[in-house]
Image: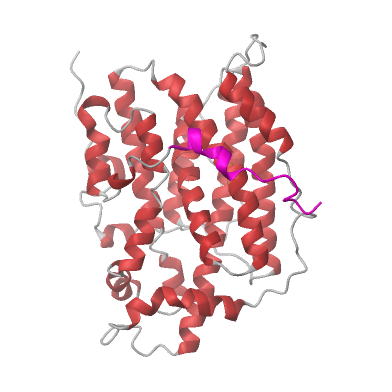
Amino acid sequence: MALDEYASNAEIIGRDDVNDLEAILSVTNTDVDEAIHTVTDNAEAIFTWDYEKGARQGLNKLYEKAKHAQWNGETDLPWDTDVDLEKNAALQRMQFAEMERDVSGTPLEKFSEQDFIKLSIEMDSWTLSQFMHGEQGALICTAKIVETVPWIDAKYYAATQVMDEARHVEVFAKYLDDKLSGHYPINAHLRLLLDDIVNDSRWDMTYLGMQIMVEGLALAAFGFMHQLTTEPLLKQLLRYVMSDEARHVAFGVISLKEYYAELTDAELKERQEFAFEAAVRMRDRFLQQEVWDRMGLNVKEVLPLVMHSPQRQLFQTMLFSKIVPNCKKLGLLDANGGWLRQKFTELGVIGFEDNPDTGEEYAMFQLAEGELAS
Ligand SMILES: [Fe+2]
Ligand SMILES: [Fe+2]
């Protein structure tokens, strides 16, 4: 049977041109003052009567590792660290060195050193806020996987991930509250993506959206921030979170590798389209439109400048360093004549396809013996 045509960009992401700034910025949150946000979950809860532990060795191994890798966000992190925001911001400030050379005639022209430092603090606060919201997304998605996945080894493992994610939300929230000055609301693009993932009725789509795409990106982004920051508390916090996160992405890769081997071309096509949608939504959020608003700048005037910064482009691309090899391992890049390969090529991220995939790489992120404080 011939495969139906792939959906167009307009059908998948609501615009033809992935780089259409007007369209990206027109997506904003309207309910930022609401205390809760409700999403309908269309999936069925599945019981299994097959209790044979270890039938899936890869998952069983992850589960056993996870039991030993639990840390305590309250007692393992040095919360008494005095965090000097301005000093850290001055370092982040290097990020803008490139832009600065060329700011004449732009809204940044009148920016003083102090303004740039404030901008850096806001960007950190925005970034950590989105990490926190994404972590809550992971908490909810993993609880959903416990319910919907048909394999007992996967239910066991997902249960440990629920605990991991609770801890991640907890530590990011605490850091934002105690060390920064509160948090930003969830970015509209990230929210759309989380809504889609929770909404979907197919259990593997939760994995694909969360473990492969959102957590794949998070693992790369945490790694980048971990490298960049000299703030000891944040560095430690990110180190711990990454050690869990690598396991989570491996959980996605190992589970879906088995499942996707049995899907039809038509079913794989839907997964390819979903992966592309998720990739674009995550890329859109990194424009940080809310930060520019808060700094009193016209987003449309400042963004072209930001987008052309070489460091920025490097950072944006690097965010896909885990996603692309993992999609390749799952067969999504090359299924059906390589549609997703083409899309990732257009996004400029295909260069990562031969990076190590996280199904193998996760062990490298494990905490060493004695690395925890308690
Ligand atoms: Fe997490
Ligand atoms: Fe995670």
- Residue 366 in the figure: left or right of residue 255: right
Residue 253 lies in magenta, yes or no? no
> Image height check: is 281 above or below 144?
below
Q: Nearer the viewer, residue 261 or 50?
A: 261
* 158 to the left or right of 14: right
Q: Position of residue 297 (x, y in %)?
A: 39, 78
Question: Residue 353, located in which quarter of the rendered image?
Answer: top left
* Quadrant in which ligand 2 is drawn: top right
Residue drawn 19% across the image and 28% down it: 5
Which of 280 and 92 lies nearest the eye of the viewer? 92
Q: What residue do we see at 27% from left, 36% from top?
A: 340
Q: Position of residue 182 (x, y in %)?
A: 63, 68
Q: Is residue 40 visible?
A: no
Quadrant of the frame with the N terminus = top left
Give whichever of 287, 76 is nearer the camera: 76
In the image, residue 139 sits, relative to residue 284, either above or below, namely above
Of 281 and 157, nearer the camera is 157
Q: Is residue 365 magenta?
A: yes
Would you say 23 lies left or right of 51 here? left
Apparent side of residue 328 relative to residue 132 in the rendered image (left or right): left
Residue 237 in percent (x, y) is at 65, 57
Question: Which region is colored magenta?
Answer: 357-374
Task: Give the total number of marks visible in the rendering.
Answer: 0
Name the residue rendered at 35%, 33% in the picture: 328
- Residue 81 sits in which quadrant? bottom right
Q: Is residue 44 above or below residue 351?
A: above
